[in-house]
Amino acid sequence: MKECKHVAIIMDGNGRWAKAQGKPRTAGHLVGSDNVRTIAIAASEMGIKYLTLYAFSTENWKRSKDEVSYIMKLPAIFFKKYMQEFLDRGYRMNIIGELDVLPKSTQKVLYDAMEESKNNTGLNLNICMNYGSQREILLAARKYAEDVKNGIADLNLDEAGFEKYLMTKDFPPVDLLIRTSGEERISNYLLWQIAYAELEFVPESWPEFTPAVLQRCLEEYSHRDRRFGGVTNE
Ligand code: FPP
């Protein structure tokens, strides 16, 4: 099968899924966070090395106070349940985003997860918290400008050089971007990193996104003709 190293997922539809079950939106987020474990294991078994998940965007602060505060508590619930298993499986946790504005207790859980797993070489499970791609690119540009000002960088920056300023500097480009729940938007996610990614929009909500659906996505991906701007060689 065509190599697919890096899969990114916009985990959408938790709220609608919960509402359809007569439950509060937060119940959808809890089931959604349990599904992160299920899909991480499946992805790793399917040979994916990098799984990057959109958990909370820079725009998600607009949600109700109760919902935001619940999502901020989820990492603690999630890692308490699953961190040991992730360590046993050799997964490395990376959190992407501006973490310094998150509640202190949330920051601690996230930094601990990164620290405890930093020497692991299995699946890179990347969770985006308070992440927005335009902001990421803006911050990178500011850092670069500062380096130029301080004489650390010159003006001959190329794409590979600019990538070193992004929050995803340690990861390869995204091969496949999946969005659940039928919406067909990118929503300020990994705009630089998906330059040549294949895109798939699936009708299932995130709580309904099973390993079989992931398998279906990878099968679809394997039929795509990735030319990266060149001509087909098939
Ligand atoms: C999108 O569904 C989901 C979110 C904004 C939150 C996603 C969070 C998780 C799946 C859990 C995160 C996991 C960890 C480990 C922190 P939505 O609420 O936008 O759904 P809707 O479009 O139906 O309203």
Image: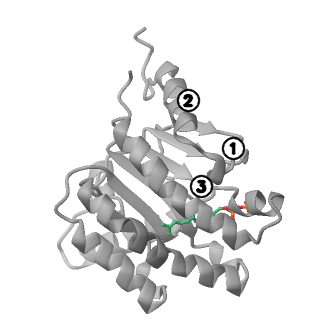
Mark 3 and 2 residues: CB-CB less than 8 Å, in contact? no
- Residue, far bottom: 104
> Residue 3 falls in which quadrant of the image?
top left
Please name the residue shown 40% across and 47% down the image: 41
Q: Looking at the image, tell me whether mark 3 or mark 2 is earlier in sequence order.
A: 3
**Label 1 sits on residue:** 204
The amino acid marked with disc number 1 is Glu
The percent position of residue 107, horizontal first and vertical second, equals 40, 83
Q: Residues within 10 Å of mark 2 (few under 14, many from 20)?
A: few
Q: Is mark 3 within 8 Å of ligand 1?
A: yes
The amino acid marked with disc number 3 is Met
> In this rendering, would 156 be left or right of 31?
left
> In this rendering, would 207 be left or right of 125?
right
The percent position of residue 46, horizontal first and vertical second, equals 38, 35
**Label 3 sits on residue:** 11
Residue 16 in the image: above or below residue 106: above
The amino acid marked with disc number 2 is Arg
**Viewport quadrant of the C terminus:** top left
Q: Alpha carbon of mark 3 to alpha carbon of mark 2: how far?
A: 17 Å
Q: Is residue 156 visible?
A: no
Please name the residue shown 32% across and 56% down the image: 163
Please name the residue shown 39% across and 65% down the image: 82
Foreground residue among 228 and 9: 9
Q: Looking at the image, tell me whether mark 2 or mark 1 is earlier in sequence order.
A: 1
Q: Alpha carbon of mark 3 to alpha carbon of mark 1: how far?
A: 10 Å
The percent position of residue 52, horizontal first and vertical second, equals 43, 54
| SS label for mark 2 | helix
| SS label for mark 1 | loop
> Residue 187 falls in which quadrant of the image?
bottom right
Residue 231 in the image: above or below residue 176: above
Residue 15 in the image: above or below residue 44: below
